Amino acid sequence: MDNSSAVRPIVTWGWAGAALEGDESGDLHVVATLPRGALLAVIDGLGHGAEAAEAAREAATILREHAGAPVSELIELCHEGLRKTRGAVMSVASLDMRSSTIDWCGVGNVEGVLFRRAAAASTREAMSTRGGVVGYRLPQLRVSTLSVSAGDTLVLTTDGIRNDFTAAVDLDAEPQAIADMLLARYAKGSDDALALVVRCLEATP
């Protein structure tokens, strides 16, 4: 059977997460595929338990419903939608493999690191985040645009994962294996925790 016309994936990805003491987790991830790429996000509802989970679910729904919008607009939509919740912090990234770029922005204590596969490029780049709470106090948003190539790997984590993980990321490992490792080795154990690992693939024609 000829599969030459089949749609090829833009990314491959994996995630791992855990709730604090068996509670419902307030940490969620979003991976929404787009014709040109993908929308990627991690959301951390403030605190933990049911109210944190409610805020995270509301943000995830908004992101999925408007996945093709610019990153700054997505965060502003979440800010309006979360006003009646306890709020959340989040990192949002929009990947466009046709232009080989990624737009990303973080609000609050979340981490984002882009690991570059090409030997000639810098090893990794960290996302610049601004203090604030989506749904309560939104800072002036700062969206960064970076070039990406096939094989580059994006890691987004909530603050339940220690931020000293960068040296342990093995770019030869599959995204799910990296996510499992981050949760097993770097989860603080004092909060909900989540790691999302996304690898860029070749762009579709």
Image (spheres, helix red, strand yellow):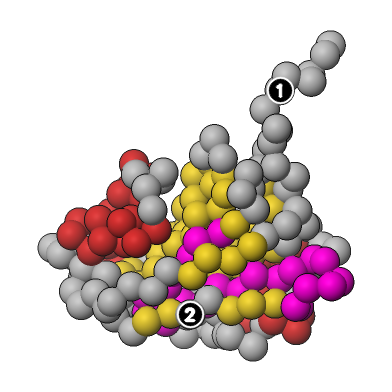
**Mark 1 surroundings within 10 Å by alpha-carbon count, few (fewer than 14), some (14 through 19), many (20 or more):** few
Please state if 76 lies on the left or on the right of 34 as rendered: left
| Quarter of the image where one finds residue 90 | bottom left
Q: Which amino acid does label 1 sit on?
A: Ala
Furthest residue in direction front, as rendered: 99
Residue toward you, 17 or 197:
197
Provide residue 30's location: percent of width, then percent of height: 47, 53
Q: What residue type is labelled 2?
A: Ser
Disc marking residue 6: 1
Q: Report helix, strand or loop for mark 2.
A: loop
Query: In this picture, is 119 found above or below 31?
Result: below
| Quarter of the image where one finds residue 88 | bottom left
Extent of the magenta region = 102-123
Residue 63 visible, this angle: yes
Q: Does residue 110 belong to the magenta stretch?
A: yes
Residue toward you, 183 or 49:
183
Residue at 41%, 44% (x, y): give it.
Answer: 68
Number of numbered labels in the structure image: 2
Residue at mark 2: 128
Real-space Cα separation, disc 2 to disc 1, in angstroms: 37 Å
